[in-house]
Image (tube, grey):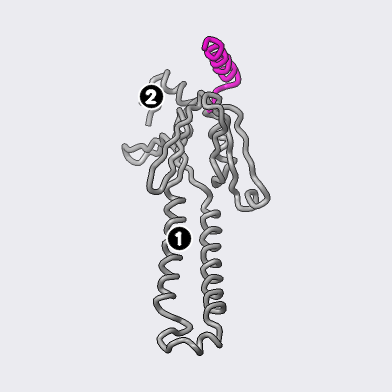
Amino acid sequence: MSNEIFSTEQRQSLDRRLIQKLVRTAGEKEIIVTHITVRQSITLLLFKLIIIELLAAGALILFHTTLFTTDIESQLPSGISLFNIPVFLTLVVIKTFITFFVIFQWLEESYEITPKEIIHNRGFFFKHVERHSFNHLVSLRVYQGIFGKLFNYGTLTLFNWAKNREVSLYLIHNPMKYMHILERLLPEPDEEKNILREKLIEEERE
């Protein structure tokens, strides 16, 4: 398939600004990726689920050993046994609710990287959306601890000079891959200087 589907001006813009262009020919069809959705590393989700299972098991053991010792159990009515079904079902429901909450919280928080901005979506019951234009972002850094390098997750941070605060892509999978993508989308050093100069001029006028 020919590259003539794009004008010269569009190709020059896409060469510098697009995150990733995947054009796959399948007969007469083509697929163009216009944005990338990034979530926290699934390794962290698995860690949280394992912790929930361990805490649930620990709570059940503590419940039986503390409240239902042999002496106490012998003094309770026959209807209350060591494995009291209503209590057990209540613990199962609580654990299930917490598990689903953690999973949905992971699913509902994401970062969208487009050619123009980073969009941070989060919120389980109440949606919250933050947009950060690449024209306002500088100083890209990556943070990975020992476990982050081992399990390939980390945090990318940028500084939004328009909002005067840091923007983080928190504990995402394969942070080096997305760092290279963001490096292509951020303004060139000369453009960055011009943007900062314009910002300082605007502040002086105010």
x then y, percent, for residue 68: 52, 81
Residue at left offset 54%, top offset 40% = 169
Q: Quadrant of residue 157?
A: top right
Name the image quarter holding residue 193.
Answer: top right
Residue 21 placement (x, y as % from top left): 45, 34
- In the rendered image, residue 40, in percent from the top left (x then y), is placed at 51, 47
C-alpha span from label 1 to label 2: 49 Å
> 27 or 144: which is nearer to us?
144
Residue at the location (59% across, 40% down)?
A: 176
Look at label 2 and name its amino acid.
Answer: Phe
**Please, which residue is most extreme toward the left here?**
28
**Main secondary structure found in the magenta portion:** helix
The residue at 39%/35% (across/down) is 32
Q: Is residue 6 above or below residue 169?
A: above
Question: Residue 17, image x and y in percent?
Answer: 48, 26
Q: Is residue 201 magenta?
A: yes
The magenta-colored residue range is 186-206
Q: Nearer the viewer, mark 1 or mark 2?
A: 1
Q: Which residue matches tag 2?
A: 6
Query: Counting residues from the N terminus, which is met first, the one under dot 1 or under dot 2?
Result: 2
Snapshot quadrant of residue 160: top right
Q: Residues within 10 Å of mark 2 (few under 14, many from 20)?
A: few
Contact check, label 1 and label 2, Cβ < 8 Å: no
Q: Amino acid at mark 1?
A: Ile
Which residue is identified by label 1? Answer: 98
Is disc 2 placed on a helix, strand or loop? loop
> For this rendering, which residue is in front, 93 or 161?
93
Near mark 1 (Cα within 10 A), the count class, few <14, some 14-19 or many ≥20, is some
